[in-house]
Amino acid sequence: MSEYVFKLPDLGEGTVEAEIVRWFVKPGDVVAEDQPVAEVMTDKAAVEVPAPVGGRIVRLHGEIGDKVPVGAPLIVFAADTAGAAGAAAAPSAPPAPPARAEAAARPARVMASPATRRQAREAGIELATLAGTGPGGRILRSDLAAAAAPAAAAPAAEDATTEIKVIGVRRLIAERMSEAKRNIPHFAYVEEADITELESLRQHLNGRLAAGAAPLTYLPFVVVALARVLQEFPQCNVRYDEARGVLVRHRAVHVGIATQTADGLKVPVLCNAGDLSLWDVAAQIRRLSERAKSNRATREELMGSTITVTSLGKLGGIASTPVINAPEVAIVGLNKAVERPVVQNGAIVVRRIMNLSSSFDHRFVDGYDAAAMIQALRDRLEHPATIFLPKVQ
């Protein structure tokens, strides 16, 4: 029997290899043309790979977590059921039977998002055993929680352990964080900002929103202010090209928005932040964050940032030491905003305070410049009218 070898296709953007994150099929399965057979990871983007032909699968090349070069064998189909492509590879093979009809006789593929599939795999839950409550029987996270609840409630006879293979986005995060801390001498600087007036402005603007509109958070104000401040500190709006030993200084400000997702931390990019209004920045942050959380962000939306802002929201704590998003040279973190007593003009008053925690690449940004930049950002936030001025004289 002849065989048709399906090789990992070129997934674009200079990709030379991809990591196998999930197999949707196994040897012996009969699939239809264009049916998803694998999920692979390139850079930060997860991609479902469809079958180029319909037919029976003979064997798979690679285990979950393996990296496969572009052009290397991925799946082998039996040529007698591989359709036109298989026939072309083996002219003597008999005509292909109707693959879609064979696939129809098999149970329908379980409907679930890539994030839900990963959670199920990590929890040791077989999706095929669950009845999805989502549209068309789609399995939701709540279905996983319900399935895991009885097992979690049962008393353990002994100390059980679960091994979770580090793959996909989590592996990329681990590699990049390790590389950043290993190669970049981080310089941390924390400054407190009195955002009482900023909070008053934010509340005023939110009070004028149409019913159902998303309220403004602090993040859009910080991004707009940062874009203005970087005009005075261009040495912090830089990407380091290590291969060439060159600092690439950008005039435009492309802000990475660190976003926590079910798959781990992703950094979608808000391009040309200095050219956008406060409302445009807020809308773009919401759009990019939603796309990252739903695993719909494109490669282009996850690349090209010149500086990153990270916020833990209500979990922000007092201070943090954010890790630089290489090849950038600076990152700014927002901590929790709290009301506390402070001394002002000799009197004790209650003010809203938020710490700005930042990290800089000390190879290229001097401590003085780092502190001066964060202080300039603090001044804009403390006097919010200046956020909207192109440059403070």
Image: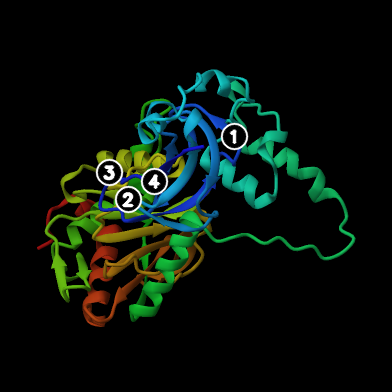
**Which element type, helix, strand or loop, lies under badge 3?**
helix
Relative height, residue 353 to residue 108 (above, below) = below
Per the image, the residue denoted by label 4 is: 7
The answer to whether the residues at label 4 and label 3 have Cβ atoms under 8 Å apart is no
**100 vs 346: above or below:** above
Q: What is the number of the mark on residue 302? A: 2
Q: Are marks 3 and 1 in contact (CB under 8 Å)?
A: no
Distance of label 2 from label 3 (alpha carbons): 17 Å
Q: Which residue is drawn at 38% across and 30% down?
A: 91
Q: Gap between marks 1 and 4, in whole Å?
A: 18 Å
Tell me which amino acid carries mark 3. Answer: Val
Q: How crowded is mark 2: few (under 14 residues within 10 Å), some or many (20 or more)?
A: many
Q: Where is residue 259 in the image (x, y as percent from the top left)?
A: 42, 52
Residue 29 - label: 1
Q: Distance between the residues labelled 4 and 2?
A: 27 Å
Q: Which mark lies nearer to you, 4 or 2?
A: 4
Name the secondary structure under disc 1.
loop
